[in-house]
Image: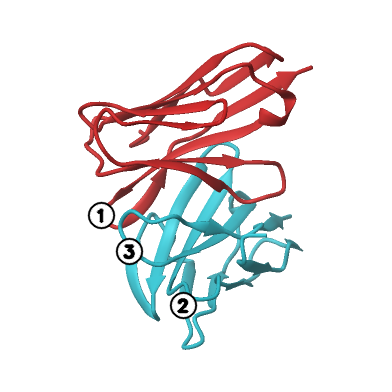
Amino acid sequence: DSGVTQTPKHLITATGQRVTLRCSPRSGDLSVYWYQQSLDQGLQFLIQYYNGEERAKGNILERFSAQQFPDLHSELNLSSLELGDSALYFCASGLGGASGELFFGEGSRLTVL
Amino acid sequence: TQLLEQSPQFLSIQEGENLTVYCNSSSVFSSLQWYRQEPGEGPVLLVTVVTGGEVKKLKRLTFQFGDARKDSSLHITAAQPGDTGLYLCAGFQGGKLIFGQGTELSVKP
């Protein structure tokens, strides 16, 4: 158990819909990272938050947004969903340094039909 | 193009064989990490290599960081079925932890 909790574990929805994925980081970790994992693209960095502030951004689509709340949990919002958004979405937490270990949740599997 | 290129992408071997997985980049990294991911789970950190030329051992796994800090390798001695999984190298660039595309290892009994 990494200490990182992600909900929901599985989500099936239709194209055009909007979903919210939730992440609770490990106790004491200030940094939250979101990744998308698909078979053809591998594990792609989306965005990082540190203590409520956005710190780094990857190739995150404009249809996607995220935030980190004062209690340090984070949400990833995916809107106007397309078939290609079907993937595993991972949240990871860490202390926030440039060389530290990340602790990953078990992921949220999104299927867009 | 991937910032971190891993090879091979797939590897299927028999129990007891040795194998090496490579992680290469044209960029210099202050450190590289190796993670292992099993189906239905998130990646778990195996090791971080920091110094050019560094060699770290974790039981039957040996990790090496290239002298120029642009590449790393993972060598598994006498592989076992329990070693089956996705092996990922990763490095920080611009504050982002970037992953290679992974090596899918299958060890058959």
Going from N to C along the chain, the mark reached first, 2 or 3, is 3
Q: Mark 3 belongs to which subunit?
A: A
Displayed quadrant of residue B30:
top left
Distance CA(mark 3)–CA(mark 1): 8 Å
Q: Which residue is mark 3?
A: A56
Contact check, label 1 and label 2, Cβ < 8 Å: no
The residue that appears at 65% across and 67% down in the rendered structure is A6
The residue that appears at 51% across and 86% down in the rendered structure is A71
Judge whether residue A39 can be spotted in this image.
Answer: yes
The shade of chain B is: red
Amino acid carrying label 3: it is Ala
Asked if residue B76 lies left or right of residue B71, the reply is right
Residue B58 in the image: x percent, y percent? 52, 34
Q: Which is nearer the eye, B33 or B41?
A: B33
The shade of chain A is: cyan
Same chain assignment for discs 3 and 1: no
Disc 1, SS: loop
The residue that appears at 67% across and 13% down in the rendered structure is B13
Residue A105 in the image: x percent, y percent? 61, 60
Above or below, A64 relative to B88: below
Q: Which residue is mark 2?
A: A67
Above or below, A10 relative to B57: below
Displayed quadrant of residue A27:
bottom right
Q: Which residue is mark 1?
A: B94
